[in-house]
Image (cartoon, rainbow, N blue to C red):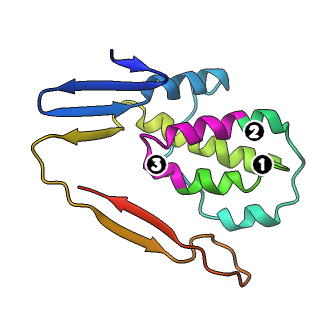
Amino acid sequence: MHYYLGLEVWHNPSEIFLGQGKYIINIMWKLRMMDCKSLTTPIVTNIRKLRDSESYLVDPSMYWKLIGSLMYLCNTKPTIFFIVNTFNQFQMEPIHDHWIVAKHVLRYLCGIVDYSGLRYVSNSDIQVQGYTNADGTGKTERVHPKVALVWASP
């Protein structure tokens, strides 16, 4: 089996590759973004301004579907994890600016759809390393620090 629940699995005796290229294409097709211009970064540079934006509200159900799809893509695309977590903070009242930034992530995914995923090699030494960010929230006001842990292996 190579495709199951939106996850592509390719294996041979020495490695396993997990990807979600077909799932990304399905999302792009549903949102009519197949011909969009791809981007090189998943996040806009002025992400902090999203909290103060005065844009109009968008359909919450469409926003929830898009964010849910992006959350599922975090399984094989760890580069979008931070921005998808940021989107989750706006689920109660999503505005047009949030929708535009979420579509920015899709434009990024459009550029990497053919060659991104997770590759596990059986003959490599796995070393687990931990990284922490005491306040990765991006908030400018004083808040209690939150701890985020990331475990990575080469």
Q: Secondary structure at mark 2?
A: helix
Question: In this picture, is 62 found above or below 86?
Answer: above
**How many other residues sit within 10 Å of disc 1, few (<14), some (14-19) or many (≥20)?**
some
Region in magenta: 65-81
Residue that appears at 64% across and 37% down: 68
Residue 137 shows which numbered tag? none
How would you classify the magenta stretch by its main secondary structure?
Answer: helix
At which x and y percent is residue 16?
24, 32
Residue 40 shows which numbered tag? 3
Question: In this picture, is 142 found above or below 150?
Answer: below
Q: Earlier in the sequence, mark 1 or mark 2?
A: 2
Between 12 and 79, the one lying in front of the other is 12
At which x and y percent is residue 104?
61, 45
Q: Are marks 1 and 2 in contact (CB under 8 Å)?
A: yes
Please name which of the two marks, 2 or 3, marks the residue nearer to the observer: 2
Q: Secondary structure at mark 1?
A: loop
